[in-house]
Image (tube, helix red, strand yellow):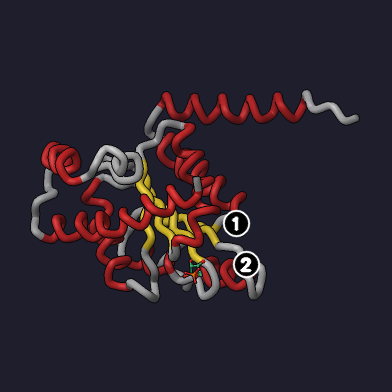
Amino acid sequence: MVSAGIHLIRESNAQARDVVTRRHAGSMAKQKTRSNQSASTFSASERHRVTASSLVAIVMGSKSDWETMRAASDTLKDFGIRHESHVMSAHRTPKLAAEFAGAAESRGIEVIIAAAGGAAHLAGIIAAHTTLPVLGVPMKSDALNGLDSLLSTVQMPAGIPVGTLAIGKPGATNAALFAIAILANKRVELKQKLKDFRAAQEKKIRETKLD
Ligand code: RP5
């Protein structure tokens, strides 16, 4: 199952570039136009990863991050949030990352979740190219267990913020919940869903019985 997800993510790289290219060509100025382009550009199997009207974009430095970041995607899915997921790297594809971030707002994206491990600069470089809220998720690394990722993501210089979550899967889930909380400020139904989620979570804990 993981490999299928990774396969789709890899394909979404080309789509991310395509989106950026079309943006530069001035062909994505209007929402309606975007929807039409989406229908013709993305195949049915890819559309759940890349939608023309995504509210949240999840980007990650490597396909090896997808196993962790799937938790963010699944959480957004549970709340019915249109989103897309891409692999792009601050170091390996710096131009793509900058162009993607620069075009995101005009595409209707409202929050970007950026995950990376090791010398984790992706969230920072994304934040440098957009004023959208950027949520960073440090990946657990082999060498330093994610402490390297955490410090490189969280220690931004004053002026360019990255809201940094916990290392690994808890961070991925919470990044999605944080994005939902941001979106919910102006969406009453979503706010209610978030409250219901919290209430269900609390109920579960209160009803926990130990052997
Ligand atoms: C970072 O380097 C990625 O975000 C990933 O967490 C880490 C290792 O990448 P791979 O070598 O697995 O591609 O850029």
Q: Position of residue 101 (x, y in %)?
A: 30, 60
Task: Identify the residue position indicated by label 1 in the image.
Answer: 168
Q: Residues within 10 Å of mark 2 (few under 14, many from 20)?
A: many
Quarter of the image for residue 186 reads top left
Label 1 beta carbon within 8 A of ligand 1 = no
Q: Are discs 2 and 1 less than 8 Å apart at CB?
A: yes
Q: Residue at x 47, y 55 (%)?
A: 135
Quarter of the image for residue 207 reads top right
Horizontally, is 14 left or right of 127 in the view? left
Quadrant of the frame with the C terminus:
top right
Q: CA distance from mark 2 to mark 1?
A: 8 Å
Horizontally, is 151 left or right of 74 in the view? right
Label 2 beta carbon within 8 A of ligand 1 = no
* Up/down of 201 relative to 162, above or below: above
Q: Which amino acid does the dot numbered 1 rest on?
A: Gly
Which SS class for mark 2? Answer: loop
Q: Which amino acid does the dot numbered 2 rest on?
A: Gly
Q: Residue at x 77, y 26 (%)?
A: 206
Q: Residue at x 43, y 34 (%)?
A: 184
Task: Identify the residue position indicated by label 2 in the image.
Answer: 146
Q: Residues within 10 Å of mark 1 (few under 14, many from 20)?
A: many
Residue 55: tell me if it is visible: yes
Q: Position of residue 130 (x, y in %)?
A: 31, 60
